[in-house]
Image (cartoon, rainbow, N blue to C red):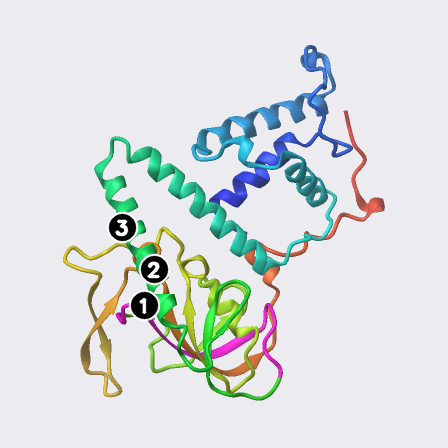
Amino acid sequence: MTTRISFLLVALAVAFVGCGNGEADSSVDLENIQDRSNFDQASYFIGFQMGNQIWSQMDSIDVADLNMAILLAGAREALQRDSMRLAPTNVRRVMRAFEDSLGLRRLRRQAVDDTSAQAFLDEIATNTAATDSFFASLEGIEGLQTTESGLRYVVLQEGEGEPPAEGDIAQVNISASLMGGEEFRALSTPPDEPASLVVGTFLVEGLNEALKGMAPGESRRLFIPPSLAFGFGGWGDPAPSDSSYVEVENDEDFNAVPVEIVHYIPPATAIIIEVELTDVLDPVDTSDFGIGTAPPAIPQEAAPAPQQ
């Protein structure tokens, strides 16, 4: 994962994990660290520097929020080059919820003497209530299905074949709108052209989840809650007057055509995506995207001998 919070948590874990045998020991004697080996002194210095950098940025995290034993165990397994025990999809969902929680905490603290922070909290509360009402209004839709994560969808056209897996390249046609009906550009690809997505890496987790259950040729209308879309923070910045502005595109004759596009997703807002899976192509290695199995360990015979 490439988010700032996840990087800080990993760095925090490493800072707490002892060098060499990978075990954390809060009772280690540091009184004469300046007289220890170069490796011990370097370990202390790296850990101290990490601690300074981490705590200067972790203004929203209290150590009490974290299960330190689990945090250290996860760091130890990463240092031992073990495979991660959590599915990438679950990690993205959990970290989105975690970061949303930290963001709300920060806003509440700022709102004490910052009217703009209070206004943003009020917008979140208003949009959360509207989102709840929106999903309640869906209950009578024929064929509506709800997954364990809270994603709702309706199958518009059945497909045939194997669905894509994590890392597969899905060729799709997509249109997207806010829950109020305002259309927005979900991809940089022009709306009349198919797009290629690496399954599991798209920003909207609800779309990643849906694609892994779709067969080629299948179309679905997805009703995606904020927790599986853009979270409580939303996305982008509103234009001065409203949430959209005009772009210029070229039509088939290369004539400039003005097109109004929403470039702002309000906080705590559900979105609707209609997606058609047209084809599934060969997979790519998603470990390059920051989630997955740890890199292979250096073979013992190839590892350099330690020097003091």
Mark 3 lies on a secondary structure that is helix
Q: Do the residues labelled 2 and 1 touch (CB within 8 Å)?
A: yes
Mark 1 lies on a secondary structure that is loop
**Between residues 133 and 50, which one lies in front from this camera angle?**
133
Please provide percent x and percent y for residue 146: 50, 70
Task: Count neighbours of disc 3 (C-alpha within 10 A) and say few if under 14, some if 14 to 19, many if 20 or more.
Answer: some
Which label belongs to residue 123? 3
Q: Residue at point 72% right, 15% down?
A: 29
Measured along the vertical axis of the image, is residue 293 above or below residue 167? above
**Between residues 146 and 67, which one lies in front from this camera angle?**
146
**Between residues 242 and 3, which one lies in front from this camera angle?**
242
Please provide percent x and percent y for residue 307: 78, 28
Q: What stretch is highlighted in magenta?
A: 162-182
Measured along the vertical axis of the image, is residue 141 above or below residue 54? below
Please provide percent x and percent y for residue 211: 52, 74
Residue located beneath label 1 in the image: 179
- Marks 1 and 3, how far apart at CA: 15 Å
Which quarter of the figure has residue 73?
A: top right
Task: Count neighbours of disc 1 (C-alpha within 10 A) and say few if under 14, some if 14 to 19, many if 20 or more.
Answer: some
Mark 2 lies on a secondary structure that is loop
Task: Count neighbours of disc 2 (C-alpha within 10 A) and say few if under 14, some if 14 to 19, many if 20 or more.
Answer: many
Type of the residue with mark 1: Met
Q: Is residue 173 magenta?
A: yes
Type of the residue with mark 3: Glu
Residue located beneath label 2 in the image: 269
Measured along the vertical axis of the image, is residue 29 above or below residue 178? above
Ranked by sequence position, the earlier of labels 2 and 1 is 1
Q: Residue at point 34% right, 33% down?
A: 109
